[in-house]
Image (spheres, rainbow, N blue to C red):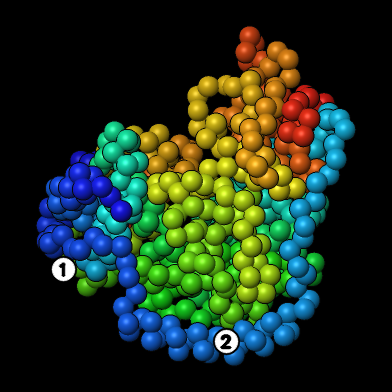
Amino acid sequence: MSIEELVRAELRSVAEQVEVPSLPALDEPRRDWRVVVVAAAAALALVVGGLAFLLNDQDDPPARPIEKPKIEHVNSSAPTIPWINGGRLFVGGRRIPGRWLEVYSGGDTWLARRSDTRVFWGRGSRMHDLGKAQFPLPYDGPYLSRGGRYVGIGISTATLVDTATGRTTRVPLAGSAEIEEWVAGVTDTGVILSTRAQQNAAESFAVRPGRPPVRLRTQGGRLTRTTASGLLLNDPQGNDWVVDVVGSRVRRVARVSDGDPTAITESASLSRDRQWLLDLGWAKDRDEPTTLPVSAVDDGRPVPVSAPRGWVFAPQLAPGFWEPEGTLVTFVVRPENREYRAARCAPALGECVLLEES
Amino acid sequence: MLAADDDADFSAYAAQAWAGLYRRAFLLSGQHADAEDLAQQTLIRARRHWAKVVRAGSQDAYVTRILTNIYLSSLRRARVGREVLRAVPDSPAESVLSPIHGELWPHLLGLPPRQRAVVVLRFYEDLAERDVAEMLGISVGTVKSTTHKALAQLRLALGKELA
């Protein structure tokens, strides 16, 4: 009997032996009074810590207003942002050795997972090993802050890497064995953003080393993870939002999923300048469209962005990499001979150009 | 709030699906308390999105996706997180976790959660690699390598036990 057959037989046998309890009540969860009392006590403690935090939080800059760079034409030069083309990682136009699966970046820092599942952060071609991550980084991290200053990861204890100095700090989180607390993101000022989850309830916190945690005002939502779009908040309806955290405030920037309970990552990618949303559903389609599914964040209007004449988009290779200017580096294919090329697309202008081959 | 007809439909579905859902949840979590929470949360979420579940065609497949997503998103993050930076899988769980004994079961429980999810989807649900990949939002290659690693670990554990 093969190992596959053994596993199949064992799982079926275990499932058959399981004693199934009767169907429980399926009402929406409500807080019982004991939870409320405990939460109130915790809240009191947090208020004290929170006031101290806020009084000392003047070095956290306010959320930046949305910058809207003006683009007058789309250029065909090689991208300077970290991006992956056919498994090759390029940073600042230079190739980083190895085959790579995914890359995220902020400022001049990048975070990437190699095909052997090792994760590295780096600046330019200098890189630092963080260990292995078998699954894509948005699942559990590590996460990079928006401007690239910090890398954060952890359950129960957060590990914070200052990418300016390379210094690593371990910060205990306040969860317990029963109530897990995990890092969902990190800010450029080194504040760890964590979520503490228990059955049917979750709260998110801002944790600064050596200070009491501050409960974030999430309006019933919880911070979940950081993706290429940014830090995500899952709201009570199940929608994912890209958010900014300043002090104890959580500001919603753009909705990036429609509450599909089966989705693990967001269904739209937010541009770095936060003006555009690229629908990621297209990457799952087998079709090769001639128009990018982009919409404007401000008013939700669809923004038609056409492929270069004679080419169609190839979303199966990668949805694309947003550049700080609000342009997207993505891939196109020529239908008649299946030649693949990288292209730069500008939603502001509605057009794409082929990139010069490196 | 569901309309009366939808509520009746959902209640009928929940009653008929509960046992299977609980068994799947047990295979993922390995503990009765976790399995009950997981299956209950899954049905609560399915009820909230009942119109989508109905539109999806295969209600069981859709609900299995919800179950797997909830399991991977929350209940096992602690172990997964350790896996990331340490890269050393936990030792097989003690059989005291469950009164159920099987030759392979303790070793299946000892697999990292993501590996166990892939194994359950591949060999209990009998899903194709492509379907597992789509359900978990990962590539077919990752499904293959994860399955390979899990089976290698199980083969090794079984070999040691039989030696």
Secondary structure, mark 2, is helix
Q: Is residue A155 above or below residue A148?
A: below
Chain of the residue displaying label 1: B
Please give left or right for residue A47 compared with residue B9 in the image.
right
Residue at the image position 40 percent from the left and 34 percent from the top: B130
- x and y percentages locating residue A28 in the rendered image: 30, 62
- x and y percentages locating residue A147 in the rendered image: 75, 59
- The amino acid at mark 2 is Val
Location of residue A236 by image quarter: bottom left
Q: Which residue is mark 1?
A: B99
Residue lying at the far top of the rendered structure: A336
Please give left or right for residue B101 compared with residue B37 in the image.
left
Q: Which residue is mark 2?
A: A47
Quadrant (top left/top right/bottom left/bottom right) for the C terminus of chain A: top right
Q: Nearer the viewer, residue A24 or A140?
A: A24
Residue at the image position 32 percent from the left and 82 percent from the top: A33
Q: Nearer the viewer, residue B108 or A66?
A: A66
Number of other residues with Cα within 10 Å of mark 1, as a class: few under 14, some 14 to 19, many 20 or more? few
- The answer to whether one can see residue A322 in this image is yes
Please give left or right for residue A63 compared with residue A265 in the image.
right
- The answer to whether one can see residue A94 in this image is no
Secondary structure, mark 1, is loop
Residue at the image position 72 percent from the left and 85 percent from the top: A55
